[in-house]
Structure formats: C-alpha cells, structure tokens
Image (tube, grey):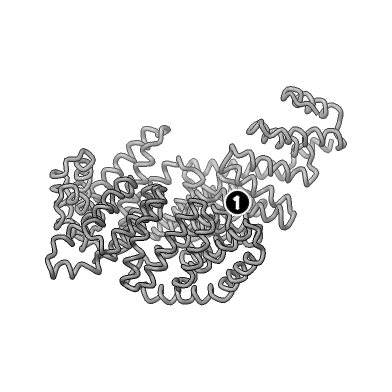
Amino acid sequence: MNETKNIYDPQKMNFDKLLGEGITFVKNQQFFKAIPIFKELLNINPNNLKVMNLLCESLYEQNKTREAISLAQKGLEKSRNQLNRFFINKFNKQIGFGFQKNSDYDKAVIHYKLALVQNNFDVGISIELSKCYLKLNKIKEALKVCEDAISYNTLKEEEERSLSALKITIEEEYQKAFPEEKYLAAGNRYFDERKFQQALSEYEKAYHRAPNNILILEKLFLVNIELKKNKEAIEIGEKIISKDINFIKTFYKGRGEFSMLSNVYLNLYEIYKNSWHFIKRNQCESMYEYYQLILRGAYESTFSYKKGIEFFTAAYQKMPERYEALERLIVTLIFDRDYKTAIKYNAIAFKIAKAEKDKQKFARYYELEALCYQNLAQRNKEIESLEIELKFTDDIERKTYIYSRLAEIYKSQGKTELYSKNIDKYWELVRNGADDFLDLQSKLMEEQVEADKNSDYNLSYEHFRKGSFLNSQKKPIEALAELKKAFWLLPHELKIVEAYSRCLRESGFYKEASNMAYEGLEIACQIFDNKYAESFFLSVACYWFYDEANYDEARKFYELALKHNPYSFDHAYKIALCYDKLDYVFKAMDNYEKAYEMKSSEKYVLDRIYEILTTKNISESSKKTYLEWLGKQNYKH
C-alpha cells in the first residue's frame, strides 16, 4: 500500500501534469501562458533545472531580457553545484543570449565560450559567438570560431548553410580589415619554396599596406638575409628595434632545443642598437659584415648549433679584439656540449675582459667556465670558478644560486663544515636580499611600463623559465622563489599559475597549492581556458586528501580530474583510495578494478582488493564474484 502511494504521489502527478501543459504552450508559441505555469512549478521545486531553462526561454520570447538573465544566473549556480554539465552549457548559453540582446557583446562572448567548454560541438553557440566577435570588430577570432564549427562532422544541412553564409560575411570584413594578409600568405608560400625574390615582392606589397606590422618587417628582414642584401636587412632591423626591442626575444622563444637561445636575440639586438650610430657615422664595411655574421649566427642557432658556431666563429675571426661574437660562440658551444672548446675560447674572452678591466665580463667568464666544469663533472675546478665569480658579480640572484650550488657540491663530498657555511650564506641572501631585490625590480618595472608594454610579460617569463628549470633539477625552494616572482608579475597567466601550484604541491605546501589552484580555476572560467583544469583539480584534491584528510571532498575533485583525463590510472586509483578511506567497500573495489584495467602492471591494486575481501564484512555471493574476477587476472595471494 505504501509503495503504491509513493509511485502515485498526487503532488508529483500534479507537477508532471503542469509541466506537460507548460511545454505544450511553448510548442504552440503561447509563451505568455507558459510563464505563470513554470513559475508555479518553481515554487513547488525551486531546484528543477529543466523548468528554469524553459522559463528562461519563455521570458526571452516575451522580451523580458533582464528577468531572464537573472534567472539564468541562478540556474547556472545551481547546475554548477550539482556538477550538471548539460545545464551548465544551457544556462551559459541563455546568459550569453541575454547579453547579446542587450548589445553587451563582451559579456556575451564570455558566457558563450564557457558554454562551448561544456559542449564544443554546439553549432548554435558557435554561430552566435562568431556574430558577437564580428560586432566587437574581432575579425580573426570570428573567422576562427566559424571555421572550427565548419570542421565538425555532425553538421546538419541547415547548420552548414548558416555557417557558410556567415563565413562569407566574415571573410569580406577580414579583407577590409587586413588587406596585407593575402600578400603575407603569398610571401610565406614563396619563402617556403625558397623563391626569395618573389617572396620579397609579396612582403613589400604587404608592408605598403601595413607599415607598422612588425611580423611583416621580420619577414622582410629574413628574406633580405637570404638574398644577401645585408644593408637592407640592417635597415629593416633598425625599424624592428625602434618599434619593439623585445619582439625578437618573444617571437623566437619557442624555437630550438633551448628556450634560453631567445636571450641571444635580445642581447644581440641591444649590442646592435648601441653600435648602430657608430656604424652609420663611420660607414665601416667590416662592422656591417661583423654584425651581419652575428645576426646570421643567431638565426641559424635556432635550428642548428653547428651552423650557429660556423657564423659566430667567422664573426670572431673578422674582429678577434671584440667580445660580442666570442661570447655568442662560447654559449653556443656549451649548448652543443663541446665544453672543452668552449673553455679554450673562454680563456681568450678572459684576456679581453682583463684588457678592458670590465668587472661584468670577468663575472661572465667565470660563470661560463663553472658551467663547463659542471658538465664535465670536474667538481674542484667548478668550485674554484664559482668562488672567484662571487668576488665579481653583484647580481643577487646569481649569488644565491652560487651559494646553493656550492652547498650542494660540498654536501655530496661530505664536507659538512663548508656545506653549513654556504647554506647559511644562501639563506641569509634569501631572507635579507630577496625582498630588496624584488622591490628594486618592481620599481624598474613601474618606470618601464609606459615605454615597454611587454616588460611585465618578458620579465615574468624569465622567472617562469628559471623556476621551471630549477624545479626539474630538484631545487624546489629556489624554483618556488622564481615562480612566485613570475606570478606576482603576471597573476592571470594560467601557465604560470599552474606551474606555481604544481611546485607548491610537490614541495608539500598543500594548503598554498590548493589556494593557488582555486585562483587558477577562477581565472580559467573568466578567460575560457579549460586546458589546465586537470592540474588545478589535482592540487585541490591533494589538499583535501593529505592535509585535511577530507576524503569525500578529495574524491569529488579527483573525479573532476578524471573527467579531463579519463585514462589516468593515478586519478582512478586515488578515487578508489578515497572510497577505501571512507569505508565504502564496494565502491572502493569497483574503482580499484577500473584503475587496474587502465594499468595492469600495478599488482598491488589486486592485493588491496583481496585484503578488503578477507577483512571486511562482505556477503558470500559478492565475495565469490570478486574472487572470480581476481582469478581471471591470474592473481595469486
């Protein structure tokens, strides 16, 4: 009798009846009749996401935009709390549509992109997002969204027609906004085919239409080098420098085996800029050739260290009394792992530094020498070079590294007293000098911000690269110091937030890692980037698991991480472990089973399943089922 009452609950029957009536009114376009019904249903069940979504649609149809947006925002919050991806997509779409109707295209873009995170193949969202970009005059972004949607394999005929028509409109706008693009593309094709004269002609057409486009200038620079038009290349190089001296460093940061090669470009162009007036004034052909060889060496080094060495050697031989080409040659030899030859040339550099009485060059000489001896595993010579470098360098960061490196060597040699002395010096610098150094850097950044809008970006990425390298070398304290500086300068760069959070987590600072991960998740939602979500969820999960022992909360975040990486054994195993800790034996065993299927080499998972079967109170039938499964895995206890 009770069962019958539960099944035929009058309240539920009335709810379903009203919902059916409301949906019928929507189908018949009678939205003014549907709205009061949906509102009544929400009074009965305020958490029903389906009803909220239907009411939103009806309100929009009646031009009650503000009310619809407010309701959709409540729906979005409820769907997030319930981790309901379907309605997260729906309500983001509803909010985006509302802002689009109100001509608030920036906010519309935010919510359309968040909706696409949940469902990349929603063509309707792609169309509206592309239209919003078009209204904001972001033509390239509009075209990309449109082209991505056209590439879907599941397009209906009507969707394909709409997208094709939209793409034609966007392309017309694109041609108006970027007339230089077609010439640039043609120049790139000729350049790839090594038809440099035709490439030059196309790049020049592009330049006449967009003389301030630094990418076009860079292409002109490269094609003139290939055509051996050295003076023209140098003139274009001066234009690039006058617009943005950091451009070359940023542009080339991803090329070559070592991102440190980007420093070659910055140093090279600073040298080149400083000497330009001397060259022009004296019309010195040998100086033209000297700097041309350095330029070519820097370019070739990004693809082949051997070719770079050839050009730097030629530049050094042309002017052996100068330091610039020699230093580039030594650095490239080190990258090429020819440490003995690098030491030989470094000795020549030392003589130049001595003749010029240049303290900075002395410090650089000993830094490069120490690096060579480190790679040759000649520890005593490395110690000697580092200790002499300390006398010449004023760089706090470099001093900090030297003390930490000396401490590391002395510890490996068992020299306890010397280890203690250097580690004390290291901590003294970290505690007393680092804050002053950061204050100085902050002041410098403030002064430069107007002159160089990319200064924060470049300095932050220098710290980020150093931090990542130090972390890979198992130096977490130094890595954290560098990543913290990078984060301070660029607090909204997800790559930096993710690296800082991961380094904190790996160093055992779970609470700090969790806070940083929450910040990252918030930023990712704001700028529509789901790429780093897995790492952020892991940071939060680790905090709840290790620091708070709140295994239920940890489980939720491990499950979110698993959604982003459904083949991760580690995530699946951690979920099983959480259930195990919570004493949910069947859920624990089911998840251990899933984890084992992902990685059958991890036999300890089977041990744990067997241990649960033999120590927990489980029915004989369930025990038999699991034992049979263990038998199929050839498990022997």
Label 1 packing within 10 angstroms: few (<14), some (14-19), many (20+): many
437 relative position to 448: left or right: right
**Where the N terminus falls, by quadrant?**
top right
Q: Where is residue 406 in the image (x, y as percent from the top left)?
A: 56, 63
Query: Which residue is tagged 1?
Result: 537
211 relative position to 467: left or right: left
Q: Which amino acid does label 1 sit on?
A: Phe
- Of helix, strand and loop, which one carries label 1? helix
275 relative position to 416: left or right: left
- Residue in front for this viewpoint, 225 or 458: 225
Q: Which residue is drawn at 29% across and 46% down?
A: 307
Q: Residue at x 32, y 37 (%)?
A: 161
The quarter of the displayed image where residue 605 is located: top right
Q: Is residue 75 visible?
A: no
**Where the C terminus falls, by quadrant?**
top right
Q: Position of residue 225 (x, y in %)?
A: 19, 51
